[in-house]
Image: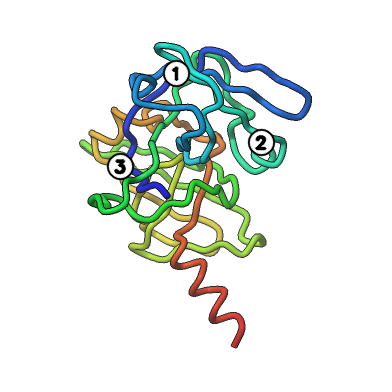
């Protein structure tokens, strides 16, 4: 489990395609604190550390992960949002995030609003996911609050700290983003559909 509070902005330093798998080498200030077999969220995707050096580590994304996320769009030099798994009994600053991306969305607009930023997103509603006004959403691993919830889209407002310390500062119209919808909302929806 994660919280959606980004700890570091890592840098992709190598991408190695191996059959249907993609090995990502990430340079991060978190590396010395990581261990082999540890879960780390990469743009909201939970991946396992498989090897590490002094300042970088490697994770592997399988075909299933690459099909459902934006990880296959990464290039060397790209930044990526990183978060280690939450510690049980610690403060939950964001919301409960599983690190399991539900689907890809598209950034449809970015607008600077006199000190903050508004981002609009669309997604395919046929997959059964939904947002609710003032509910939680995870975008590229960042826990955010939904504004202007619609059938196939929503918006979020970004404060300067989040803008500067996540990949939001490089996000532009047309970019693919990883979406994890609120886990509690998913369970409530499934429960009510049964009746």
Disc 2 versus disc 3: distance between alpha carbons?
A: 27 Å
Instruction: Specify the quadrant of the image occupied by residue 127.
Output: bottom right
Coloration mode: rainbow
Residues 181 and 60: in front is 60
Disc 2 versus disc 1: distance between alpha carbons?
A: 18 Å
Residues tagged 1 and 3 counted as in contact (Cβ below 8 A)? no
| Residue identifier under label 2 | 66
Give the percent coordinates (x, y) of residue 52.
49, 18
Left or right, 109 with respect to 58, comes to left
Residues 71 and 31: in front is 31
- Closer to the chain start, of discs 2 and 3, is 2
Q: Nearer the viewer, mark 2 or mark 3?
A: 2
- Closer to the chain start, of discs 1 and 3, is 1
| Residue positioned most to the front | 36
| Residue identifier under label 1 | 11
Disc 1 versus disc 3: distance between alpha carbons?
A: 22 Å
């Amino acid at each position: 489990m994660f919280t959606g509070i980004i700890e570091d902005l890592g840098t992709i330093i190598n991408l190695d395609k191996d059959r249907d798998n993609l090995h990502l080498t990430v340079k991060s200030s978190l590396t010395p604190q990581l261990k082999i077999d540890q879960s780390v969220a990469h743009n909201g995707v939970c991946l396992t550390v498989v090897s590490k050096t002094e300042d970088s580590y490697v994770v592997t994304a399988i075909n299933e992960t690459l099909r459902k996320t934006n990880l296959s769009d990464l290039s060397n030099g790209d930044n990526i949002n990183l978060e280690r798994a939450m510690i049980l009994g610690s403060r939950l600053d964001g919301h409960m995030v599983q690190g399991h991306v539900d689907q890809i969305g598209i950034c449809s607009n970015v607008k600077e609003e006199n000190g903050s930023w508004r981002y609009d997103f669309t997604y395919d509603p046929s997959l059964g996911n939904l947002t609710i006004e003032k509910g939680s959403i995870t975008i590229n691993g960042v826990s955010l609050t939904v504004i202007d919830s619609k059938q196939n889209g929503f918006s979020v407002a970004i404060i300067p700290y989040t803008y500067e310390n996540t990949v939001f500062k490089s996000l532009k119209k047309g970019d693919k983003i990883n979406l994890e919808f609120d886990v509690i909302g998913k369970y409530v929806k499934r429960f009510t559909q049964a009746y």
